[in-house]
């Protein structure tokens, strides 16, 4: 059965947060065996405050061959009242939060580290916004499908004023600044 196309969003707030994630991706040091990705964990807006960035991350920011999503989640866990440097399960801080990542979260890690999809699912984050799908340069990624199979909403962020956003995310992922 063919894969369902990933829904898109053109909402200005999602474009804004994806651009911030792209700025994070540009901080990554390019390497020939991995992508340069940026990620943000963003709070849910409420009547008393707008959505705000809770944590940022980029590829290889933290020691251990880390991915952007892992870095953002680990930094958020470390800054919370939790005594752990990672979330072992859903956390109230992430209730209603969204993840913005310049590339679809990985479903397989050649290093043996926990894939980002599993990390996202463990946190209870329900909405994921991506800049582009992961190309098959290193592995076949099924991140979007796995997230959707577990009831998560996944959207590709599209900027109607700059139709090259996905291409820009991919160029930066492959090492262009």
Image (cartoon, rainbow, N blue to C red):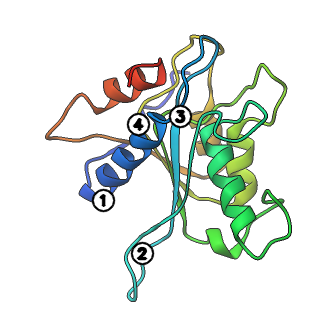
Tell which circle, 4 or 2, labels the residue nearer the N-terminal end.
Answer: 2
Q: Earlier in the sequence, mark 1 or mark 3?
A: 1
Could you tell me how far apart the alpha carbons at marks 2 and 1 are, in whole angstroms? 11 Å
Tell me the CA gap for discs 4 and 2: 21 Å
The furthest residue to the left: 161
Residue 26 relative to residue 92: left or right: left
Mark 4 or mark 3: name the one nearer the start of the chain: 3
Residue that mark 2 sits on: 45
Q: Please identify the quarter of the rendering in which residue 117 is found.
A: top right
| As drawn, 56 above or below 107 | below
Give the residue at mark 3.
Answer: 104
Find residue 30 and report its horizontal and vertical position in percent. Answer: 54, 20
Q: Mark 4: few, some, or many residues within 10 Å (few <14, many ≥20)?
A: many
* Disc ID at residue 62: none
Q: Nearer the viewer, residue 63 or 133?
A: 63
Q: Are marks 3 and 2 in contact (CB under 8 Å)?
A: no
Marks 1/3: CA–CA distance: 19 Å
Sequence-wise, the earlier of marks 4 and 1 is: 1
* Placement of the N terminus among the 4 image quadrants: top right
Judge the density around disc 2: few (<14), some (14-19), many (≥20) Cα neighbours within 10 Å. few
Residue under label 4: 131
Which residue is labeled 1 in the image?
Answer: 13
Q: Is residue 96 left or right of residue 166?
A: right
SS category of the residue bearing label 2: loop
Q: Name the residue: 65% across, 37% down.
A: 146
Closer to the camera, 22 or 100? 22
Image coordinates of residue 118 in percent, x first then y, are: 74, 43
Q: What crowding class fits label 3: few (fewer than 14 Cα within 10 Å), some (14-19), or many (20 or more)?
A: many
Please state the horizontal and vertical placement of residue 166, each as a whole percent of the image: 34, 29
Q: Dots 2 and 1: beta carbons under 8 Å? A: no
Residue 160's place in the image compared with 123, above or below, is: above
Disc 4 to disc 1, how far (Cα)? 14 Å
């Amino acid at each position: 059965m063919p894969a369902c196309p990933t829904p898109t969003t053109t909402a200005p707030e999602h474009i804004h947060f994806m651009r911030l994630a792209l700025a994070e991706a540009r901080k990554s040091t390019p390497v020939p065996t991995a992508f340069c990705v940026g990620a943000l964990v963003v709070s849910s807006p409420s009547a008393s405050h707008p959505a705000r960035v809770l944590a940022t991350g980029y590829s290889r920011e933290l020691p251990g061959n880390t991915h952007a999503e892992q870095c953002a989640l680990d930094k958020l866990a470390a800054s919370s009242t939790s005594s752990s440097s990672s979330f072992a399960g859903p956390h109230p801080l992430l209730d209603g939060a969204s993840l913005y990542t310049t590339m679809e979260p990985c479903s397989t890690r050649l290093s043996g580290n926990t894939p980002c999809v599993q990390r996202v699912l463990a946190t209870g984050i329900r909405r994921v916004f991506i800049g582009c799908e992961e190309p098959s340069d290193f592995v076949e990624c099924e991140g979007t499908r796995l997230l959707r199979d577990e009831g998560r909403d996944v959207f590709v962020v599209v900027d109607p004023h700059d139709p090259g956003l996905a291409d820009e995310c991919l160029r930066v992922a492959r090492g262009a600044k």
